Image (tube, coloured by chain):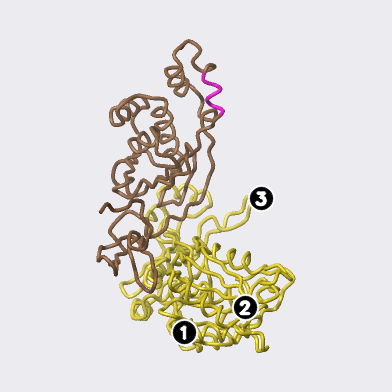
Chain colours: A brown, B yellow
Amino acid sequence: MDDFEILLKGSSEAHGHLCPGQVIGVRMAMLGCELIGLDKPSQLPQIKSLIVYVEIDRCATDAIAFVTGARLGRRSLKLVNNGIMAATFVNLDSGKAFRIRARETSRKLVAEYAPEVADERQQQLLAYKNMPLDHLFEVQAVAVDVPYNDLPGPTRFKNECESCGVIVRDKREIYKNDQVLCRICAGDSYFKGRT
Amino acid sequence: MRSDQTSLPQFVSKKIRVEEAIGTTLAHDITEIKPGLFKGPSFRRGQRIQSEDLCHLMRLGKRHLYILDLDDDHVHEDQAVLELAQALAGPGITFGSQPNEGKLALKAVYDGLLKINVDALVAFNLLPDVMCASRHNNTPVKAGTLLAGTRAIPLAIERAALDQALKISQRNHPMIAVKSYQQVRAGLIITGSEVYDGLIEDRFETIVAGKLSAYGSTLVDRVILPDDQPRIADAVKTFIERGLDLIVTTGGMSVDPDDVTRHAIRQAGVAEIYYSSGVLPGAMFQLAYQDDIPILGIPACALYHRVTIFDLILPRLLAGEHPDNRDLAALAHGGLCLNCRTCKYPDCSFGKF
């Protein structure tokens, strides 16, 4: 795996700016990969062994994706939006998994780890670089049984919506009124059509 | 299920040096003893050996291992169970990607009514070397709950036997599924002159509204009427005209002269009516349909018993089913509530068959 500063530079460019969230995300991802025994997560063959569950859709999430190579489109990045700055790193081959959560108490330690910086944002950024990992994160060994229909790889499940005919993949269909339906036709939609 | 005539598993094991073991599959458990701390298998039968395992195996004094060396006619239990689960899992069912001791658990993706093709499940279990155990058909289930477990029984199953099991599952698809509930707008007609005249306070509204909302449905209209057949019939017609999806009537289901509600439903022009069920509590239940709108007649027992026939039929109606007199009679087997001191329904025998 590349050096922290190289990863941070790349992550910030990919994300669009350098921010404390980038620092947290890069450090979290580096730690997560180390814990599950992956040193080149974004390269073959390790790219096929990793799944990352992120629990928030904010800056750190992009950094985690950059460092690990986990992507939504590759089905290796899963968003379980709990609104918590946390992520779980899963090695599909060994079954090892660790959930890493950013400690809220780390915010209070910012001045201690970057006393020379006056600007609040810059102070956070530097402090999160300097802070020992155990002050920054809480780490928990966990077990994650990734649903078979959520695994990367070829599409294993396809169903045709009996109402609109659209193909629904990966067991996202709903069985309602004796019909296999897409979520939209089943009434579980995030949008309303305009007439 | 294995018959007495079935031959023993015919996988082949091979002895290899530990250094050659990366990527191979262990044919046996390897026990580790840490004095005073731990004794148990550090490596399990069926486990694939990774590079990081070699040092550990060496430390345990292993220089050779027996590994599985399957021919093309056999499938390892972990691969077999993934194929079985894929074939068994209909809509609304998911399962993990990591078999545990050769087993996979099938779980609900969303809240709904569990549907099991019982005849097909029996046929599946009659085959050699596979099994699947499930919860009862028609059980209301929550997202994430365990519904069934399946496995291939030997460590290595014959490809032909596995294919036979897959064929049964595919021919009877979906073997196991969860039907999602419709969110209905319901109306309630509370009948009884004693309630209408204010002699006793109604308690049905709270009970019915609570049971509907537990399934995501809403009680949108309510009327209290005396035991007056024409007025009750008019209320039924009015609720139908208002476009409600489901109508519940309470009281007046017995055989006393003042119990006119079930007759009023017929007077409202409703033709499809089924009276009485094989369920206690709930024998004097009536289920009727007008233009596919269910009209339920709940007897007074629902005031006193936490769970009744109403709890058995409501989820099926909300799942879009159209139970009839045959279904009400079939509930008899398992239709006896044991009135347990602490009610565990639906995790009990009530309503299961």
Sequence-first tag of 2 and 1: 1
Q: Residues at marks 1 and 3, common chain?
A: yes
Task: Identify the residue position indicated by label 1 in the image.
Answer: B270
SS state under label 1: loop
Above or below, comparing residue A12 to residue A69 in the picture? above
Q: Secondary structure at mark 2?
A: loop
In percent of the image, x 41 and y 61: which residue is there?
Answer: B25
Query: Is label 1 or label 3 in front?
Result: 1
Q: Which residues are magenta?
A: A105-110
Is the residue marked by circle 2 packed among few (<14), some (14-19), or many (20+) residues within 10 Å? many
Q: Tag 3's secondary structure? A: loop
For the residues marked 2 and 1, what is the alpha-carbon distance in whole angstroms? 30 Å
- Identify the disc placed on residue A38: none
Identify the image quadrant of the C terminus of chain A. bottom left
Mark 3 — residue? B35
The residue at which mark 2 appears reads as B350
Whether tag 2 and tag 3 are in contact, CB under 8 A, the answer is: no
Q: Do marks 2 and 1 share a subunit?
A: yes
What chain letter is assigned to the residue under label 1? B
